[in-house]
Amino acid sequence: MEFYHALVSHSFLQYALLTGVLASVACGVVGTYVVTRRITYIAGGISHCVLGGIGAALYLNKVHGWTAVTPLYGAVVAALGAAVIIAWVSLRAKQREDTVIGALWAIGMAAGILFISQTPGYSQDIMSYLFGNILLVTKEDLRLVALLDALVVTMGVLFYNQFLAVCFDEEFARLRGIKVEVYYVMLLCLTALTVVLLVTVVGVVMVIALLTLPVAIAAHFAKRLWGIMALSAVLSALFTTAGLAISYRPDLPPGATTIMLAGAAYLAVALGSGALGVRRSRQRAPAGGGEAPR
């Protein structure tokens, strides 16, 4: 209750709550595509490249006086750049895709740490970017989050059928005249923007957890893709709100608290579903210990 009383009087808590809800909507839509297309490892590579953009933005802002360049803008540029490079490698280049993703992953993290280390007064804040601190969201950041969220959801819904075809059967999509390469690049760019949104909530390290765990839970209860999207968006909003509320009084990291809640919920659903499946299989087994009829 102390959190809800503080929410009324403190604007930074209101910004944090709105950011979590807005990011959850994009997380539900794009996270479903990511899990269905099985490109979680690509999303992981993009998320770790984001730290390089954040570090560069902080360096330019504080050292060179580029006050218009905020960490969130740097994150957007880095994420989109990584998405385009990965898409080009996947579609055109001869190098192994996993090797390039691993290289971008490492280079992005290293560049971010180097930039932050050379920015006066910001070396100690690297934990906030790695593990998230939604309480640091400003009014300007909230506007950008709302804009990115609207763009991601609009594109995700507008090209629902095309993305659905690309995720499930590329060859069939090509036969139907769908430009698979174009929509694949678009999907990676939407994933990159969603990663930026989630970095503000749970940080670079735990983005993949919030992008996939609500979808994995929703898939146990919804069968259609749009149903999984809607349910996972609701679950993400519940996890981020509960994580913010629970972490407020004991002064825990909100991002880590959110992920612990999502992880516990996923384990509970997975174990419950597994136990239910075993019980049903036993009920269907033939009596008397004989061999099942063929």
Image: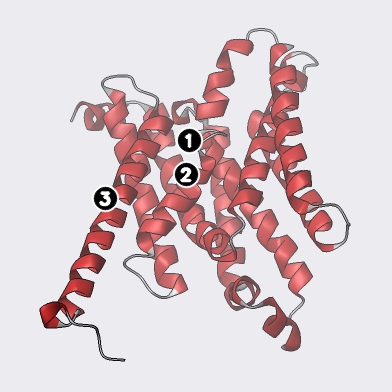
The residue nearer to you, when weighing 271 against 228, is 271
Crowdedness of circle 3 by 10 Å Cα count: few (<14), some, many (20+)? few
Q: Which amino acid does label 1 sit on?
A: Val
Side of 149 where 261 appears, left or right:
left
Residue 8 appearing in the image: no
Crowdedness of circle 2 by 10 Å Cα count: few (<14), some, many (20+)? some
Q: Which amino acid does label 2 sit on?
A: Ala
Q: How far apart are the alpha carbons under marks 3 and 1?
A: 21 Å
Q: Which label sits in the foreground, 2 or 1?
A: 2
| Label 2 with label 1: CB-CB less than 8 Å | yes
Q: Name the element at disc 1.
A: helix
The x, y position of residue 12, in whole percent, is 42, 28
The quadrant of the rendering that contains the N terminus is: top left
Q: What residue type is labelled 3?
A: Ala
Q: Which mark is residue 209?
A: 2
Q: How far apart are the alpha carbons under marks 3 and 2?
A: 16 Å
Q: Is residue 201 above or below residue 121?
A: below
| Residue under label 3 | 268
The quadrant of the rendering that contains the C terminus is: bottom left
Q: Name the element at disc 2.
A: helix
- Which residue lies at the image location 53% right of the left edge and 41% below the top edge? 207
- Residue 176 falls in image quadrant: bottom right
